[in-house]
Image (spheres, rainbow, N blue to C red):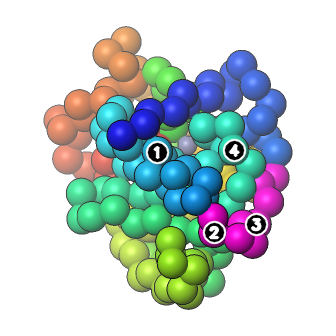
Amino acid sequence: MALRRILDASKTDLLRKRSRPITDIDRRILQLLDDMADTMHSVDGCGLAAPQVGVLRRAIVVDVGDGLIELINPELVEASDEREDSEGCLSIPDMRGFVVRPHKVTVRGLNRKGEPVEIKAEELAAVALCHEIDHLDGVLYTDKMTRIDDSKNDGDEGGEGGEDDVDSVEFERA
Ligand SMILES: [Zn+2]
């Protein structure tokens, strides 16, 4: 298990850059995927994109509690059911905000074996996938935010626990 440092968007412009497609799934890419999953789980996050750990390659991991999703070169191919929900980002600590996102998506990409996969996701998983794919294009949720979510900005790590709010999809720190 190897943890990587998660970059803070306020301290680097790396998160504003576009990540390059992965053409060769070599040992370094497999190690990157493993480390990203470990890093995400270590902070109870539900998603992480490679640029957040300083690697400008198109790889994401998502885990909303239904098992780990790893995707290389992910692409959003279908999106519907747009709704506004509160979300946060591991690279933007101590803040949450409302974003309109599709809650039903189909995403295509490659798995770690280089095989094409298609994932249909709903609710939190759909939001997380969109959030992470945005990271690969240098887009942060704050670019799309309609308003700050004050309900959780109580100084307690941006509401990492968050079980109290049943009305919003819990998108804790991806
Ligand atoms: Zn994020």
Residue 59: x percent and y percent?
Answer: 60, 60
Q: Amino acid at mark 1?
A: Asp
| Magenta part, dominant SS | loop
Measure the alpha-carbon separation of dots 3 and 2.
11 Å
- Where does the magenta region start and end? 18-26
How packed mark 3 is, by other alpha carbons closer than 10 Å (few <14, some 14-19, many 20 or more), is: some
Foreground label between 3 and 2 = 2
Q: Amino acid at mark 4?
A: Val
How packed mark 1 is, by other alpha carbons closer than 10 Å (few <14, some 14-19, many 20 or more), is: some
Helix, strand or loop at disc 3? loop
Q: Which mark is residue 55?
A: 4
Residue 37 falls within the magenta-colored stretch: no
Q: Which mark is residue 25?
A: 2
CB contact under 8 Å: marks 4 and 2:
no
Measure the alpha-carbon separation of dots 4 and 2.
14 Å
Q: Is residue 40 visible?
A: no
Foreground label between 4 and 2 = 2
Helix, strand or loop at disc 2? loop
Q: Which residue is mark 3?
A: 21
Residue 162: x percent and y percent?
Answer: 25, 34
Q: Which mark is residue 35?
A: 1
